[in-house]
Structure formats: structure tokens, C-alpha cells
Amino acid sequence: MRLELGHILINDVQFGDVSKVENGVLYVNKEEMKALLLQDDHIADIQIELAKPGESTRITPVKDVIEPRVKVSGDGGIFPGVKNKVKTVGSGRTHVLKGAAVVTAGKIVGFQEGIIDMSGIGAEYTPFSKLNNVVVVIEPQEGLTQYEYEAAARNAGLTAGIYLGELARNLTPDEIEVYETKPIFEQANEYPELPKVGYVYMLQTQGLLHDTYVYGVDAKKIVPTILYPTEIMDGAILSGNCVSACDKNTTYHHLNNPIIKNLYAQHGKEINFMGVIITNENVFLADKERSSDWTAKLTEYLGLDGAIVSQEGFGNPDTDLIMNCKKIEGKGVKTVIVTDEYAGQDGSSQSLADADKAADAVITGGNANEVITLPPMDRIIGMLDYTDTIAGGFNGSLKADGTIVAEIQIITGATNELGFNKLTARTY
Amino acid sequence: MVKGIEESGIPVVHICTVVPISLTVGANRIVPAIAIPHPLGDPNLSKAEEYKVRKRIVDKALHALTVEVTEQTVFEN
């Protein structure tokens, strides 16, 4: 399967009479976009705001971040099984508004959604401070259940992403990246001298605000399976998931998974990148056992020499991670695991809830309990009502002047476990 | 907490869903629970059926307290 990603580079976003992209500027017709999103009768009102790098702007509570994309050739459409018909994607050409994003925000669904600061120290901790963001602030209808509100908010973000992505359909990309993975035997034979490496992609699947969707299927109901990496670049995997925002994969992370990109970068040089095994992180022990058995089985079945295993979230998924690691190593397949840490505010506590000797190659996205002081911002998109109660916040986190003292787990993407951010720790 | 209480000489049964974590942290008597969001119940069942599940787990845990163990033991049945 071969996918061309055509990047249209966006360096500014503005409101305009007509939604379009011109000379690297994304123009958004606010009223048209708002009317489109208000077609969902679960939503009472929508505000659309722009947030650019360097502004004194704070966005919260953040639910998801979506990169605008459109399929211009090849089967299916972006976000298959959810926003387009369920058709296998990952081939042909896809255009991307690179440098722009949709951010969804609004009254919290649960109690643990994120913060994006566009400037100051907080901006250093989230990759989304570097993007030209179109923020969709959602006001749900009264009387909706949490589940209905979550689904409506998730859908609004994807709708907005498709609306903006469509503007890229007929543009000439500034740059084109090409990614290709072949059917298994053909792929194995292409670089027979190189070690065969796969990627075990763990998806958060613990319930409301902890869910992930694969071609529209709630991933807690899947058994581990194999995907071509390019399917993921076309939106085969979508986030429904922002609880403890620091280490949850937004839809943007899935579309731009750096582990996949880096495996491709070494493909044919140091390794033969064979494909992606997706698995889940469920709340029943039997599910954890079954899924980790199956990931190990699939690494063996693919004839892998090595596997990268990335976790999403923390706590009991640490066990899914360690089970995957132990069982895959048990098949004679070397592993590197990618995680983050909850080592306490002073960093001296045990970092993961589970451990095993097989986990002897570990990459960390940093300690989510580190405390940070976020200075007040001139402009708030969304609301600060919940700052004391979202994960990473505590009683008194929000000061009278708008300063926030909290753990970095409050910041969207701060300790991302795909290596999407800059934090890590090394031992020498 | 399990280890802290045991250090004072009182036997402890750890009822928990993720048995591997309980093993990693060193609990000696472990009784598997239902699921992480509802360790001692199951909202998918009727009240009457759920009561049976709850009673079974508690009975098993009380039984485990009375059993001498020489190594970390998971009481599956």
C-alpha cells in the first residue's frame, strides 16, 4: 500500500468572507463553519476562535486536536467508518494543511481534560502551541448524557477537520512525502538482509473519554490486528480520549505518529518495517491477557526480529505494556517500550505500576507529576471553571490573577508516549 | 498498604483486578476482582445476580485469609 502525503504549508490563519487557502494563509468563514457544526442537534451553540503561536492565549478544557486532511485519490475518504464510508484507506494521495489544526474545547465531559497555552512556559510543553489553531468551543444542549455530549464534541472536531481539509483538495502541495508498505511476503523479501521490525500500537480503551475508534469500531471490542501504516495517516484511528491530557493521543497524534514516521525513515536502511499491530487497553484482566497473547502471536506470525511497543495513558495500562513486552520477548522478538512516568512531584516514586526484567529497553516521555507554574494569559478560549479539578490540577491550582500551578499532566501532549514531545530522561 | 498492614502481623487479602500488578508489588494473598471500574460488582448483571458475584468474592477473600501460604498465591477458585 502506497500513500503520498501532499503538504500545503500553513503559516497563518485568519477569518475571511470565503474559506480558502491562499499563499500559506488559511482563511475561515466563521459563519459558514458554525452553521455546518450546528447541524448537529446535540449542540446548542458553537464559538469559533483562532489561536496562533506566540499569542497570550490559553485554550481549555481541550478535548481533541485534528489535522485537516482530504483524500484526493485512492480508495475511501478521511476518517473512514466515522465521517466517510467504511472503506479501506491508506493508498493514493492525501492532502494535508500542515501547520494548521482544529482544537475542540468546551465545558468538561468528565473531569480531566487539557490545557494548551500559545505562549510562555506552558507552550514549551505542548506541540500544539506551534500550530495555527481553529478552536471550536462547543456548548451542548441541556439534558444530554455525558456519552451523548462526548460523541457530539468528537464529531464536531472531525466535521471541522474535514471542512478545512476539503480546502486543500485542488491545491498544489508545497512538498510531497511518500510512504509504502508491501504485502507481507513481498515486504519481507524486499530487504532480506535487514532485521524485520514491527510496531505494536497500544490504544486507550477504558470507557468514556478513554476510548479510541478504528474504522468506526470502538477499539475495546477489537482483538489485535494488523494495519498498513499508511491507513493510520488517513484517519483509520481516531481519538475519543483526553483524560490526563499529557499522555493521550489526540487524533492529530494518530495522523502524525512519529514512531511510524521514524520507522519509515529507517526502512530499507537499518530495518525492514513490516507493519503495525494495533491492540487495546481494556479494564478486564481476561481482555488484557487475550490482547497481549495476540500481539505476541502476531509478532511471531509476521516473523519479526524486533518490535517497538508504545503505551497510551498510565496506571493499569502499565500492565498491558509489560504483558506485551514480556510475551513478545518470550517469542524471541526484541522489544523497545515507549511510556511515560508518574514518579511523584519529586520524581522519587516508582515510575510505572508494573515492571519486568524483559523491559530492558525503555523510552520515557517524562514525569507527568512535575509541577509547573503557568502565567496568566490575556485571553481564555473555553473556560477556567474546572482548572482545580482536572487531572494534574489540585485545590488552589487556579490563582486569582489567572496563574495556574499544576502538574504537567494538565497540558495536552506534554508527556506523549509516541515521542511527539521534547521531554525524556536518560540514564548514562 | 497491603504490605504495611502485613508487616504488623495481620494477614491481608488483596482483592484486585490487575493480578500482575498485585504480584509485582508483592501481595501474598490475591483474589481476582471483576474489572477496574467495578472491582466488586458487575453493572451488566441484575441486582440479584450481582449480589451473588459480590458474595462469592467476599467469601473467597475471607477463606483466603484463613489459608497458610508459603509464597505469593492467587486464589482463582
Image (tube, rainbow, N blue to C red):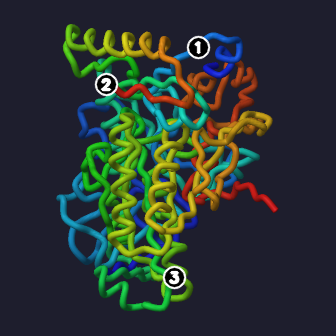
- What residue do we see at 72% from left, 34% from top? A344
Q: Quadrant of residue A166?
A: bottom left
**Residue denoted by label 2:** A141
Side of A181 where A268 appears, left or right = right
| Chain holding disc 3 | A
Q: Which amino acid is tagged 1?
A: Pro
Percent position of residue A165, x then y:
37, 63
- What residue do we see at 40% from left, 22% from top? B39
**Residue denoted by label 3:** A271
Q: In which quarter of the image is the C terminus of chain A?
A: bottom right
Q: In which quarter of the image is residue A201?
A: bottom left
- What residue do we see at 61% from left, 33% from top? B25
First along the sequence among labels 2 and 3: 2
Percent position of residue A368, x then y:
66, 41
Q: Tell me the CA gap for discs 1 and 3.
A: 52 Å
Side of A62 where A157 appears, left or right = left
Q: Is residue A303 above or below residue B72?
A: below
